[in-house]
């Protein structure tokens, strides 16, 4: 696959970078467009939740990808972007984050950022719009524990600088999505980066919560949880980290 030609559009204010890019995807925009904004008036999380960030405080961006993957493997697309953001935070900001399945960037148990992937279908097939929010200088009004790069390491790159590093880190991972062996590499890297594994977790689902020990990620990116000795896999849901389980 030839290297992607990334293209950037930037706004001082927008409703949501995901909403804007999804519309462009529907209109047939080719892969590789990236949008970044200083402020979102209607920033979104998953499941109709909101993403709060004051103007200029965060990296708020979305990537338009058109990977040749089955819908089963969409979690790995999220992982490719989350892992690239984590790498960029380490190299550009000296901020070491872990990932929480399925889509959070954490420092300790505090949320530093999140990823929101949405599938768009249009005349040119399907596209995945992957949005990333990272708290740089402040961490919004979240009631859950949150943090920022400034709070963790005392210095911050600009949102644009961090975005350039994420993009650089994403290029090789985007290529890995194209073949089974590449996706397996991503899966292994994701397992390494997930602080969810080896922990007692609660998976919160519409059908009822389940508790167990998170043990791994399967080939499609679903979370494997040992529930009283029975292995169950979850491809959707929120996870609450309960505690670390010592190996016996
Ligand atoms: C996410 O959702 O974590 C995905 C967030 C993706 C945001 C980006 S910003 C650029 C792009 N355009 C968009 O419109 N969205 C994407 P979720 O796992 O549902 O987490 C949402 C929850 O995180 C909220 O309900 C709050 O509890 C919490 N939250 C909101 N703002 C936060 C912040 N700045 N820092 C930490 N936690 C926050």
Image (cartoon, rainbow, N blue to C red):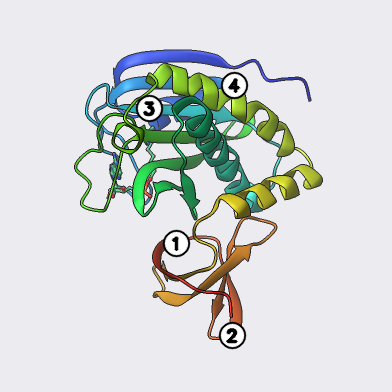
CA neighbours of label 4 inside 10 A, class few (<14), some (14 to 19), many (20+)? some
Question: Which residue matches tag 2?
Answer: 229
Q: With 172 as the anchor, is 118 left or right in this view?
A: left
| SS at badge 3 | strand
Residue 123 visible in the displayed image: no
| Residue 160 point in image, percent of width and height | 42, 17
| Residue 132 point in image, percent of width and height | 43, 34
Cα distance between the residues tagged 3 and 1: 25 Å
Q: Mark 3 or mark 1, which is nearer to you?
A: 3
Q: Quadrant of ligand 1?
A: top left
Mark 4 or mark 3, which has the lower sequence index? 4
Mark 1 or mark 4, which has the lower sequence index? 4
CA neighbours of label 3 inside 10 A, class few (<14), some (14 to 19), many (20+)? many
- Give the quadrant of the C terminus: bottom right
Question: Which residue matches tag 1?
Answer: 237
Question: Which residue matches tag 4?
Answer: 32
Question: Which residue matches tag 3?
Answer: 59
Cα distance between the residues tagged 1 and 4: 29 Å
Cα distance between the residues tagged 3 and 2: 41 Å
| SS at badge 1 | loop
Q: Looking at the rendering, which quadrant does residue 121 occupy?
A: top right
Query: In the displayed structure, would residue 146 be above or below residue 248?
Result: above
Contact between labelled residues 2 and 3, with CB atoms less than 8 Å apart? no
């Amino acid at each position: 696959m030839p290297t992607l030609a990334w293209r950037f559009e930037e706004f001082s204010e927008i409703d949501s970078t995901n909403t804007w890019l999804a519309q462009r995807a529907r209109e047939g925009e080719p892969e590789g467009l990236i949008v970044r904004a200083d402020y979102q008036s209607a920033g979104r999380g998953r499941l109709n939740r909101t993403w709060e960030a004051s103007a200029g405080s965060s990296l708020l961006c979305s990537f338009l990808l058109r990977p040749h993957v089955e819908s089963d493997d969409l979690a790995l697309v999220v992982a490719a972007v989350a892992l690239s953001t984590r790498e960029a935070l380490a190299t550009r900001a000296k901020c070491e984050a872990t990932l929480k399945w399925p889509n959070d960037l954490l420092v300790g148990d505090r949320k530093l950022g999140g990823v929101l992937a949405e599938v768009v279908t249009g005349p040119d097939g399907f596209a995945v719009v992957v949005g990333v929010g990272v708290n740089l200088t402040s961490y919004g009004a979240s009631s859950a524990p949150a943090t920022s790069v400034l709070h963790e390491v005392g210095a911050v790159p600009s949102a644009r600088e961090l975005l350039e590093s994420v993009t650089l880190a994403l290029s090789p991972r985007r290529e890995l999505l194209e073949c089974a062996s590449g996706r397996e590499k991503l899966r292994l890297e994701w397992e390494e980066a997930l602080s969810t594994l080896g922990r007692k977790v609660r998976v919160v689902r519409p059908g009822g919560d389940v508790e167990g020990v998170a043990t791994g990620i399967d080939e499609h990116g679903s979370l494997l949880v040992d529930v009283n000795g029975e292995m169950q896999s979850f491809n959707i849901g929120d996870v609450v980290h309960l505690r670390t389980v010592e190996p016996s």
